[in-house]
Image (cartoon, helix red, strand yellow):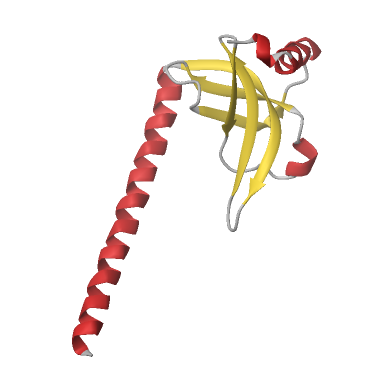
Amino acid sequence: MAEVTKISEKLSKVFFFLIIIGGIYLLIQINKDRQEIENHPGKTICKYTFCKISRKSSTAFVKYVVDNKLYRTGAGGCPENSAEKINKFFFLKYSTLDPNKIQVDFSKEVTSKAEIEKLEYQLKNWLDLK
């Protein structure tokens, strides 16, 4: 019985250690992505399309076009008052090296009718894109 306790104790320590290492890796990766966006910035607008809610977190999905290519990407957590912001347009910063790396500012809604109409047209005709 004592051996089983020692083994489970070791396993729980290893598991805890792996959780810590995974958390550190995620923080480093998030910081690298943020720096890449700052060092190789691109700007466009996006349409907030969906909020996927899981147990203790949420993911906001947006659609946007870069270099005539359509992207649908998770943009971090869903904003406050998410239901009111669905299908609205927001400013987006992306990495020109990898347009899947993005930051969306859900506090700044796009009001330019011309920009919105251009993106809407591209989203409706997405088969014509690359």
Residue at screen point 40% across, 19% down: 39
- For the N terminus, the image quarter is bottom left
At 48% across and 27% down in the image, what residue appears?
101
Residue 107 falls in image quadrant: top right
Q: Position of residue 113 (x, y in %)?
A: 80, 14
Residue drawn where x is 56% and y is 39% of the image: 76
Q: Is residue 58 above or below residue 111?
A: below
* Quadrant for the C terminus in the image: top right
Residue 86 image offset from top left, x and y in percent: 76, 36
Q: Is residue 60 above or below residue 101?
A: below
Above or below, 54 against 121 in this view is below
Q: Nearer the viewer, residue 4 or 85?
A: 4
Quarter of the image where one finds residue 14: bottom left
Side of 9 relative to 63 (left or right)? left
Residue reaching furthest to the front: 127
Which residue sits furthest left? Answer: 3
Nearest to the observer: residue 61 or residue 23: 61
The image shows residue 111 at horizontal and vertical percentages of 78, 20
